[in-house]
Structure formats: C-alpha cells, structure tokens
Image (tube, rainbow, N blue to C red):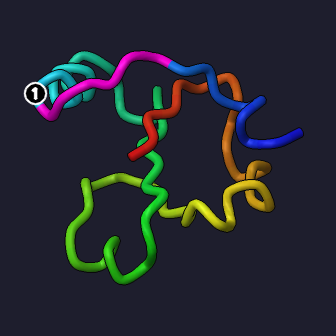
Amino acid sequence: MSFMDFFSQINNINASQLQAFIDSNREGGFTLLDVRQPTEYENARIPGSKLIPLPALNDRLSELDPQTPIIAY
C-alpha cells in the first residue's frame, strides 16, 4: 500500500479553516501530519503535529491510524 492509497484527497483549506477544524474537534481525534524536513519542523511547526518527512512517509505509514482524519501539511 502506498501513501496515496492511505489518504483521500479533499479541497485545500486555509489557516482560518484549519484553526476552526482544530477548535471544533477533540484533541486526539485527528492527526496533524507535517511532511516537511526536520529543520523546517524545528523552525516552525503547529503544536501537536507529527513529523514524518515526505520521503519517509511510505515507510512509516504504520505510525498513522487510517481511521483517524489526517491533515497533512
């Protein structure tokens, strides 16, 4: 299974829509997935996000719960 099989595509959301989603959902009810590089993650990240750099995503899919909504950025 590739990561493309793992995710269903939705329309892009902006920062305000993301904040509204976070505010309206309980902590742990979704995963914020940061697919940038570690240096980018260290410089600026959304609190509570999980770092899995895009080149490693296919090998690390087991770290994600397919039943939980995932917001990747």
Residue at 46% x, 27% y: name it.
29
Q: Which residues are magenta?
A: 10-15
| Residue 12 among those drawn in magenta | yes
Q: Dot 1: few (<14), some (14–19), or many (≥20) neighbours within 10 Å?
A: few
Residue 47 drawn above or below residue 22: below
If the image is split into quadrants, where does the N terminus sit? top right
The furthest residue to the left: 16
Q: Position of residue 14 (x, y in %)?
A: 18, 29
Q: Quadrant of residue 39?
A: bottom left
Residue at 64% x, 66% y: name it.
55
| Residue 26 among those drawn in magenta | no
Residue 54 drawn above or below residue 27: below
Q: Quadrant of residue 34?
A: bottom left
- SS at badge 1: helix
Residue at 45% x, 41% y: name it.
72
Q: Quadrant of residue 67?
A: top right
Q: Position of residue 11 (x, y in %)?
A: 38, 17
- Taking 37 as reference, is 8 left or right? right
Q: Main secondary structure of the magenta part?
A: loop
The furthest residue to the right: 1
Q: Position of residue 54 (x, y in %)?
A: 58, 60
**Foreground residue among 12 and 15:** 12
| Residue under pointer 1 | 16
Q: How many marks?
A: 1
**Foreground residue among 46 and 2:** 2
- Taking 11 as reference, is 42 left or right? left
Q: Position of residue 42 (x, y in %)?
A: 30, 78
Report the amino acid beneath label 1. Ser
- Taking 56 as reference, is 45 left or right? left
